[in-house]
Image (cartoon, helix red, strand yellow):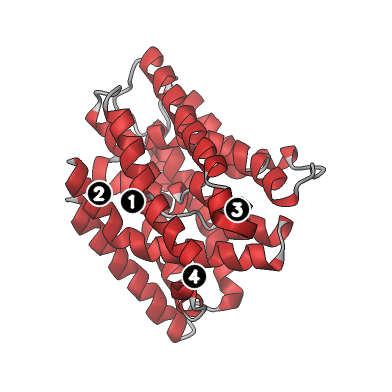
Amino acid sequence: MTLAKQMAVFFLMMLMGMIARKRNYITEDNIRNFSAIVVDIANPALILYGSIAGTEKIPLRTFGFYGLVAVGVFAFFLLMGLLFDRVFGNHEKVYSLMLVFSNIGFMGMPLVRAMYGENALIYVTLFEIPFNLLIYTYGVLRLSGTKKQGAWKKTLNIGTIVSVLAVALYFTKIRFPDVIIDTTRMLSDITAPLSMMIIGASIPGILRTGFVKDRRLLLFTVLKMFLLPAAGMLILSSILTDKTFIGVCFIMIAAPAASMNTMMAAQYGTREDFETATKGVALTTVVSLFSIPLLALVLGY
């Protein structure tokens, strides 16, 4: 399935979420509960399934190099976020976080699985680990301006733990019972439809916020969804040869801003920070439906 067709499938899933929200099958009250199912159950199952399904392994040295590449990707976007601080005015810290933290879980991982299969999911864990470590440290410090007690403890969440476990299991020769493999596979199958429906259900209320008039937000969206992914992939394409890993990197970089940015802004930022993050996540998610296929076409992925 081509990337454009897969994004069309995602769009239809999001549309189902919008319809479910309109008919009150999904409400403001239960969006958080549905999100918890994806974050704490389906997504971890998807990560584990890619490690225990008996897929062909890559050499440890190559795996380590890919890990360094993933860290380098985050370093690149951290630097870009700091460089563009002055452009975004009073809400520069929120825009900086949205540049760094993309939706590699809700959208990126299901898209990688659909495009490249379970074998490629282990590559996503290389991005999941620094994502979780950074968002609860750098993210908290960036939003609050001071060190929040307990921030480091939050890095020990289900996403980080399962990602580290998946990497460890990936290089073992343990043969798991079929019942375990089938359970993780069936649980992982709900990740894409449920996560896309949750995103779709969240969009209608946000579309009424008038973000089209926000020039800084529009500038951020062009930077986040077009310019920086193109620049980043031109750099990566010059040093990488594995087409599958290049494709995974592209999806990780081209994904819209993560919904975690909104949650972090609500907890550690101001009301204005929260509203800016909400608009940014919504707009980049909508734009990603055509920006990802367009960039893939232009860049040749």
Q: Position of residue 249 (x, y in %)?
A: 35, 37
Q: Amino acid at mark 2?
A: Leu
Q: Name the residue furthest right.
A: 149
Q: Which residue is mark 3?
A: 92
Q: Which residue is mark 1?
A: 226
136 over 88 or under it: above or below: above
Q: Which residue is mark 4?
A: 214
Q: Name the residue furthest bottom.
A: 23
Q: Which residue is mark 2?
A: 295
Secondary structure under the numbered disc 2 in the rendered image: helix
Residue 300 or 272: which is nearer the viewer?
A: 272
Secondary structure under the numbered disc 4 in the rendered image: loop
Residue sitting at x 59%, y 36%: 161
Residue sitting at x 29%, y 56%: 291
Q: Amino acid at mark 4?
A: Asp
Q: Position of residue 107 (x, y in %)?
A: 40, 53
Task: Work out how far the residue at label 1 is from the one at label 4, CA to CA, in angstroms.
Answer: 18 Å
